Image (cartoon, rainbow, N blue to C red):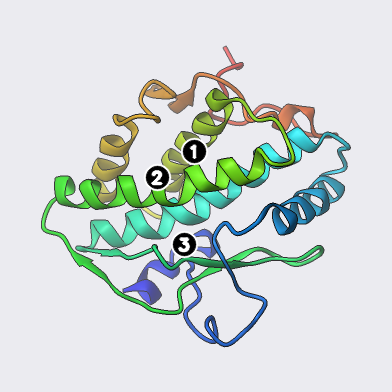
C-alpha cells in the first residue's frame, strides 16, 4: 500500500528499509536541538535570517509529508499507524520520514478513516512538533494550524481528482484545530492567514494565501 501511495510523489513517501538499524533516524519530532539545526539550515537555503519564517515553512513541509501519505492510504482503505514515525535530516540533506514497523488499520468509510487519522496526526505528531519548535522560536497558533490546514488541502493538488482523498481532507479540515483555518472557493482552498513565504527573498504569495484578494 505504501509503495502505491509513494507513486504520487516525494511528499507521499514513507521509508521502510533500514529505518530501525540506522542511528540517523530519530523518533518524531524528537528534541529541540536537531529541529533547531534543521531550521537554521532551512533558513540558509531560503536566504533568510528570520528563524520564524524558516520554522514556519519547515513546519508546513513536515505537515505535508505527514498528511499526504496517510490520507492517500486511507482513501484506499488502510490507515498506516504513524505512532512510531521516525525522521532523518541534517544540514544539507533532504528530510525523510519513515516507519520501522509497518502496520495500520483497515477502514471502510471516510468517517472511520478520519476518526483514526485526526488524533494520530494532530495530537500525536503535529502538536508535539509545534511544542518542540516553540523551544527555539515563537510561532502563533493561528500560523501553525493555518500551515497544517494548507499542507492538508495542498495534498489534493498532487495526482488526479480523487473523491475519496477529497472527502477525507474536507472532513479533517472541519475539525479543530483546523476548522476555520480556511475554506474552499473558486480558487480552491484559501487559508485565512499566511505562511510567511512572502518574506523569503524572491518569494511571493502562495496560491492559497489569505493575503491575496
Residue lying at 61% horizontally and 16% vertically, measured from the top left: 211
State the residue lying farthest toward the top.
213
Residue lying at 79% horizontally and 55% vertically, measured from the top left: 37
- Mark 2 falls on what kind of element? helix
Q: Quadrant of the N terminus?
A: bottom left
Report x, y in % for residue 2: 37, 72
Residue lying at 81% horizontally and 63% vertically, measured from the top left: 91
The relative height of residue 137 versus residue 40 in the rendered view (above or below) is: above
> What residue did someone put label 2 on?
123
> What residue did someone put label 3 on?
12
Mark 3 surroundings: few (<14), some (14-19) or many (≥20) residues within 10 A: many
User: Which residue is more in the foreground, 188 or 122?
Assistant: 122
Report x, y in % for residue 49: 88, 37
Q: Earlier in the sequence, mark 1 or mark 2?
A: 2
Labels 1 & 2 near each other (Cβ < 8 A): no
Q: Tell me the mark number nearer the camera, choosing from 3 and 2.
A: 2
Residue lying at 19% horizontally and 63% vertically, measured from the top left: 77
- Mark 1 falls on what kind of element? helix
Labels 3 & 2 near each other (Cβ < 8 A): no
Q: Tell me the mark number nearer the camera, choosing from 1 and 2.
A: 2
> What residue did someone put label 1 on?
148
Report x, y in % for residue 119: 32, 46
Amino acid at each position: 500500500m505504501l509503495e502505491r501511495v509513494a507513486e504520487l510523489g516525494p511528499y507521499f513517501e514513507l521509508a521502510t528499509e533500514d529505518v530501525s538499524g540506522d542511528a540517523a533516524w530519530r523518533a518524531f519530532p524528537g528534541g529541540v536541538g536537531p529541529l533547531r539545526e534543521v531550521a537554521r539550515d532551512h533558513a540558509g537555503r531560503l536566504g533568510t535570517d528570520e528563524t520564524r519564517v524558516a520554522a514556519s515553512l519547515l513546519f508546513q513541509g513536515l505537515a505535508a509529508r505527514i498528511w499526504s501519505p496517510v490520507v492517500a492510504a486511507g482513501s484506499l482503505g488502510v490507515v498506516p499507524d504513524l505512532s512510531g514515525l521516525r525522521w532523518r535530516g541534517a544540514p544539507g540533506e533532504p528530510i525523510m520520514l519513515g516507519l520501522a514497523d509497518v502496520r495500520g488499520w483497515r477502514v471502510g468509510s471516510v468517517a472511520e478513516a478520519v476518526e483514526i487519522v485526526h488524533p494520530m496526526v494532530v495530537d500525536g505528531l503535529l502538536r508535539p512538533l509545534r511544542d518542540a519548535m516553540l523551544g527555539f522560536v515563537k510561532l502563533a497558533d493561528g500560523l501553525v494550524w493555518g500551515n497544517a490546514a494548507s499542507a492538508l488541502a495542498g495534498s489534493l493538488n498532487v495526482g488526479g481528482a480523487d473523491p475519496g482523498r477529497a472527502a477525507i481532507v474536507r472532513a479533517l479540515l472541519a475539525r479543530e484545530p483546523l476548522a476555520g483555518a480556511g475554506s474552499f472557493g473558486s480558487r480552491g482552498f484559501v487559508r485565512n492567514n499566511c505562511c510567511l513565504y512572502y518574506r523569503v527573498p524572491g518569494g511571493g504569495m502562495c496560491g492559497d494565501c489569505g493575503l491575496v484578494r
